[in-house]
Amino acid sequence: MSTEVLDTESQNIVKVVENDVGDYHSRQSQSDVVTQIFFLDRDELYDTVKPYVIRYDVKTCVPSENIKRSLCPLTVKDLRHVKEQLSFADCGFQVLPLNSSLEYNDFEDEEMIRTVHVPEILGRVRETFRASDVHALEHVVRRRHPTWPVATGESYDHEQPASRAHLDFSYDAVVDIIQHLYEHEADRVLAGRWQVINAWHPLRGPTRDWPLAVCHAATVDFEDDAVPGDIVQIDRVTENLQIHHREDQRWYYLSDQMPSEMLLFKNADSETPHGASCGAPHASFDLNPGVEKEVRRESIEVRILVMWDEQ
């Protein structure tokens, strides 16, 4: 049987062929789960054509995207059992406690997010990574619509969970961002060490509805598993990395994540040309397919440029 769902990156409808329930989603030990996540197909098209998604109505015959993707089964392990055994330098993610002064309803107020919550996050990240400077590139609030991921044909009031494996930025994209932000100071910033790190947490918990999964960076073959793709907005183009599935990849999530638990994960690294990983690919997944959730997924993420002075 097939179901029409909405691909969150392109906002287009795709058909998903469901396997038997036992194959689609089964419980393992503790909170480890077997589920499915969208990955970019390994298609010869991308040998010569760059993947792209257009996120506005171009009002022409140009296709809004050329992304070919499939749902791939995989095991997502619970970070709660292993987070002390993992290091950010190796896997590209970690969990930090967060004591925010904002209450749930405050996240309806964009001004409070910008002037209170984002500085809270920046201070925590700067302290944790002993950075010389931090800069918030943008923040995104996501509130899952009751019908999502089943497509309704209507636009949503808020961003929806991102269900395709990806990294938000390529290395070249961040270089361009730094040159735009810092202009005459860009060479100084680029000469130092930098990373783009996402800070992600739910607005309500426990998170049992479309939680976020992250992939251990050391288990990704970025030469073979990552493809630069263009995200075309009406006013700008950003290059991200689309991810192919590989059996060796190890994926994790934080079971029952609460608003006081912040998941940090790397999205780009100045040392990538010298062998560092690009980051931790990530995507949301359906933890309990077909089960109505008491608390729908609501979250905020802040994308942060983290900088260290040249040593």
Image (spheres, rainbow, N blue to C red):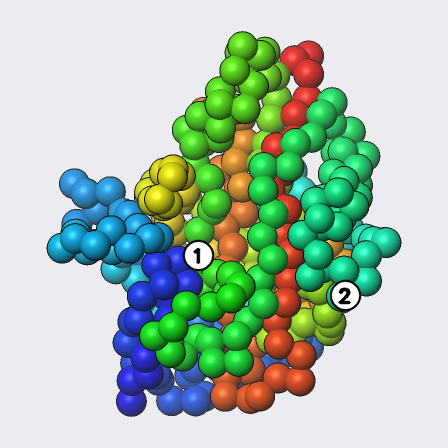
Q: Residue furthest left?
A: 61
Task: Identify the residue at image location x=60%, y=26%.
Answer: 194
- Residue nearer the viewer, 144 or 24: 144
Tag 2 residue? 104
Q: CA distance from mark 1 to mark 2?
A: 28 Å
Q: Are marks 1 and 2 in contact (CB under 8 Å)?
A: no
Amino acid of disc 2: Tyr
Q: Earlier in the sequence, mark 1 or mark 2?
A: 2
- Identify the element where label 2 is drawn: helix
87 vs 1: above or below: above
Front label number (1 vs 2): 2
- Residue nearer the viewer, 268 or 90: 268
Task: Identify the residue at image location x=71%, y=56%.
Answer: 109
Q: Is residue 65 visible?
A: no
Q: Is residue 103 left or right of residue 171?
A: right
220 vs 307: above or below: below
Q: Position of residue 281 (x, y in %)?
A: 50, 50
Residue 49 has which mark?
Answer: none
Q: Is residue 4 left or right of residue 99?
A: left
Task: Identify the residue at image location x=34%, y=74%.
Answer: 153
Amino acid of disc 1: Ala
Q: Position of residue 266 (x, y in %)?
A: 59, 42
Q: Count neighbours of disc 1 (C-alpha within 10 A) and say few if under 14, some if 14 to 19, many if 20 or more.
A: many
Q: Quadrant of residue 27?
A: bottom right
Residue 165 has which mark?
Answer: 1
- Identify the element where label 1 is drawn: loop
Work out which quarter of the rendered image holds the N terminus and state it.
bottom left
- Residue nearer the viewer, 90 or 96: 96
- Residue nearer the viewer, 122 or 212: 122
